[in-house]
Image (spheres, grey):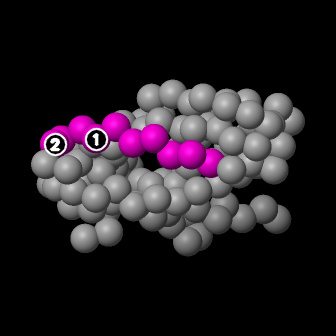
């Protein structure tokens, strides 16, 4: 005695276009959010211009700090050793300069010889 459940209870089907609408709305929302994030003004950006390993206990990291407004900024750099361990770190304040790009040299005292300088953060303080 087998019973056909579909005949007994019926079926509830959604139209096929429903999933397409959900997918299109989801993708559209994702693209809109990504565009909004990408085009936000960035008040401060910085790049490592270079670094100079001066001794076993000192490395100078040079940054180019770019600001759309002439607000003061605070930047943190660190120095890595050959084994990728952090051997020194320093945070400095970059005062307003009147220029869009400011080159800053940051001496970092290290516990042992560093092999590169890396930017951790750079953000406005004003």
Horizontal arrangement in the rendering, residue 121 relative to residue 109 (left or right):
left
Residue beneath the point at 25% across and 70% down: 126
| Local crowd size for mark 2, using a 10 Å CA cut-off: few (<14), some (14–19), many (≥20) | few
Out of 15 and 77, give the one closest to the viewer.
77
- Where are the magenta residues, as a range? 99-108
Indicate yes or no whether the magenta region holds residue 98. no
Residue beneath the point at 20% across and 50% down: 97
Q: Is residue 31 visible?
A: no
Residue occupying the far front of the picture: 55
Q: Residue 102 — which label?
A: 1
Question: In the rendering, at what x and y percent does residue 114 appear?
Answer: 75, 36
Residue under numbered circle 2: 99
Out of 42 and 34, give the one closest to the viewer.
42
Question: In the rendering, at what x and y percent does residue 1 appear?
Answer: 82, 65
Q: Is residue 87 visible?
A: yes
Q: Main secondary structure of the magenta part?
A: strand
Question: In the rendering, at what x and y percent does residue 95 appear?
Answer: 28, 58
Residue beneath the point at 30% across and 51% down: 44
Residue beneath the point at 62% across and 48% down: 108
Horizontal arrangement in the rendering, residue 84 relative to residue 122 (left or right):
right
Indicate yes or no whether the magenta region holds residue 101. yes
Circles 1 and 2, Cβ within 8 Å, touching? The answer is yes
Out of 98 and 1, give the one closest to the viewer.
98
């Amino acid at each position: 005695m087998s019973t056909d459940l579909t005949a007994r209870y019926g079926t509830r089907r959604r139209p096929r276009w429903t999933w397409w609408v959900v997918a299109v709305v989801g993708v559209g929302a994702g693209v809109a959010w990504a565009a909004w994030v990408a085009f936000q003004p960035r008040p401060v950006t910085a790049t490592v211009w270079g670094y100079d390993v001066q001794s076993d206990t000192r490395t100078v990291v040079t940054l180019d700090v770019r600001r759309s407004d002439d607000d003061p900024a605070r930047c943190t750099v660190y120095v890595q050793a050959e084994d990728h361990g952090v051997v020194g770190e320093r945070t400095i304040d970059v005062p307003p300069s009147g220029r869009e790009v400011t080159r800053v040299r940051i001496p970092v005292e290290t516990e042992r010889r560093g092999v590169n300088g890396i930017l951790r953060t750079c953000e406005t303080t004003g």
